[in-house]
Amino acid sequence: VLAPLSAFLLLQGIETVALRVERHVENANRVARFLLDDARVEWVNYAGFPDNPYHGLVQKYLGGRACSLLTFGVKGGYAGGQKFYDALRLVSHVANVGDAKSLVIHPASTTHFRVPSDQLAAAGITEGTMRLSVGLEDADDLIEDLQRGLRAARKGAA
């Protein structure tokens, strides 16, 4: 049996989940399109893009609305990835996904730092790979923060 406050908080969360997910999805789409068009980004893996191998499943099961998780490669390799990661102010440095706030992780310097580079490559992780879980913040604010990180990555890789 849940404590009364826990039950109240759970019910409140369930009642607003559709609104929150809608915002996550809209923000992720805007962020992914920004990253795709930015010359400081090598690649973007987002299921909402037609060339993504999972795009058909997004159409079939999610009504064409991809989730708010994406990965992308920052130019500048390991140093560029670290500089990008360290420069972010709005996006939190956390390894989990699906939070109300946006979260990013640079696997090569954090969660996978002990994995040999050949094994990282076999798993599809480059030295500049970033995993981003897009949250509920204003999309323009998120993009501004990502621009800050990309500027730092370019300086760090030079």
Image (cartoon, rainbow, N blue to C red):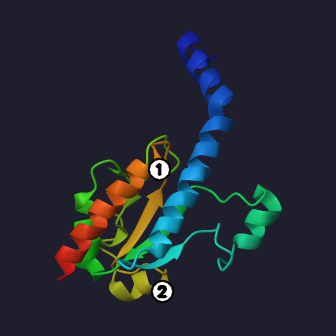
- Identify which residue is drawn at 35% across, 51% down: 91
Residue 8 x %, y %: 60, 16
Pick the front one: 106 or 122:
106
**Vertically, is 105 above or below 26?**
below
Q: Which residue is mark 2?
A: 122
Residue at the spot x=46%, y=44% of the render? Answer: 138
Question: Would residue 101 be found to the left or right of residue 127 on screen?
Answer: right
Q: Which residue is mark 1?
A: 139
Which amino acid, mark 1? Ala
**Residue 108: x %, y % from top left:** 32, 73
Q: Looking at the image, is mark 1 or mark 2 earlier in the sequence?
A: 2
Q: Position of residue 63 (x, y in %)?
A: 79, 57
Q: Quadrant of residue 49?
A: bottom right
- Which type of secondary structure does the marked residue at label 2 adopt? helix
The C terminus - image quarter: bottom left
Q: Is residue 106 visible from the viewing direction of this image?
A: yes
Q: Among all residues in the image, which is located at the extreme right? A: 60
- Residue 147, quarter of the rendered image: bottom left
